[in-house]
Image: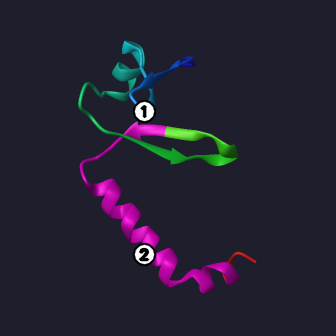
Amino acid sequence: MVLELKLRKVGNSVGVVFPKEALSYLKVGDGDVLCVTEAPEGSLRISPAKGGDFNRQMQAAQDVVARYRNTLRELAK
């Protein structure tokens, strides 16, 4: 599925309106939360959020990266 989405000004922010087909594909609706994550080659991946699990997992990952920053930097060489 390829969709073009138009950005629209909403107050002091910018928002995007998803067409019905995209919402149906993602199985989300009004009030649901979406997660946007970085994907390979500079693209973004949009998926439904699974409760509070995503935020908890991201916080845990950030804690590990902060704690082992030097080790991870050496392993990346």
Kind of residue at disc 2: Asp
Q: Is residue 4 above or below residue 51?
A: above
Is residue 60 a member of the stretch shown in magenta?
yes
Q: Quadrant of residue 48?
A: top left
Q: Quadrant of residue 17?
A: top left
Separation of marks 2 and 1 at Cα, in angstroms: 32 Å
> What colour-coding does the image apply?
rainbow
Q: Which residues are magenta?
A: 46-74
- Residue 13, image x, y percentages: 44, 33
Q: How would you rate the neighbour count of disc 2 (Cα within 10 Å): few for under 14, some for 14-19, many for 20 or more? A: few
Q: Which residue is mark 2?
A: 63
Residue ID at (24%, 48%)? 51
Quadrant including the C terminus: bottom right
Numbered badge on residue 12: 1
Q: Is residue 48 left or right of residue 76?
A: left
Quadrant including the N terminus: top right
Q: Is residue 49 left or right of residue 7?
A: left
In the image, 29 versus 12, the foreground residue is: 12
Element on which disc 2 rests: helix
Residue ID at (36%, 63%)? 57
Is residue 49 a member of the stretch shown in magenta?
yes
